Amino acid sequence: MGEKIVEWALFVSALSSIFIVFFILAFLLKEGFPALTLGWREFFFGMTWHPSHDQFGIFPIVVSTFVVGIGALVLAAAVGIPAAIYLAEFSPDWLRNLVKPSVEMLVGFPSVVLGLFGLTVLVVFVRDAFGGWGECVLAGWVILAIMTLPHVVSISEDSIRAVPNGYKEASLALGATQLQTVRKVILPNARSGILASLVLGMGNAVGETMAVLMVVGNPNIPWIPHSALEPVRVLTSTIVIEISYAVWGSMHQHALFALGVVLFAVVAVLNAVTTAVIRRGKGGWGRD
């Protein structure tokens, strides 16, 4: 009887996370649905977000969100993947044991602290070096790249080290150099894990709030940026900025909840893709 009680308690605990997510999503859909009744075409593809005129087109906001997220991911990949290759294949153990924990410590920095650093240091540097206001897409790229870097480096390095040693030994035995082995053998077999790190990093970049809120400018009426030095408005910052003065029960408030639904859907899809890529990579090794 005692084992049955413990088993049921664990079962209920496991289901609790599912119910929590379900009820949160149900609440978001309930509050956001009225905004869609105005016309889903106008909501998803409208070019003007102007709540005082009852205009709730989110297309520029969504595009700006992906511009900032993808740019940050490119910067993080350009630094993180070569760093992961070096740590996994070329660095001595003492250096790897020093560098990897240092990179992973970036996760422990509160996003508001990184945002404050970006606002007081990075924004000033961008303004002095490139002109403009400083609070722009470029500043968002750099801050989010710093926040994404630990995921890219850590997961990519673990994926590279997880490739069976027999692959590397066989390549070296056939006369390939270490660099050729990394490029032709190890990286193709670690591709799934590396892609998963990038998709996971993209999800974190899209869902980040405080740091990006403090450095991207947030114009009153969002637009699609044409330059990395232009300010933008993203999904998360729009919700945080406007929820404080949106009248409860108004169409403005319902539109902000609809933005939350869109953000939830984007992050959920990215997480599902990450899970699928990781499982595919594990299955691929088993078949080989």
Image (tube, rainbow, N blue to C red):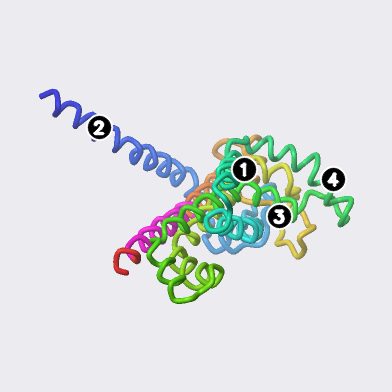
Q: Mark 3 packing: few (<14 Cα in 10 Å), some, or many (20+)?
A: many
Residue mark closest to the camera, 3 vs 4: 4
Q: Which residue is the site of mark 2?
A: 10
Query: Which numbered circle lies on residue 222?
Result: 3
Q: With respect to residue 114, does 274 lie above or below?
A: below
Please provide percent x and percent y for residue 8: 19, 31
Query: Which numbered circle lies on residue 124?
Result: 4
Q: Secondary structure at mark 3?
A: loop
Separation of disc 1 and disc 2 at Cα? 33 Å
Q: Amino acid at mark 4?
A: Val
Q: Amino acid at mark 1?
A: Thr
Q: Amino acid at mark 3?
A: Pro
Give the mark nearer the N terminus: 4 vs 1: 4
Query: Which numbered circle lies on residue 209?
Result: 1
Query: Quarter of the image holding residue 46?
Result: bottom right
Q: Secondary structure at mark 2?
A: helix
Can residue 111 be seen from the camera position used here?
yes
Given residues 214 and 41, the one toward you in this image is 214
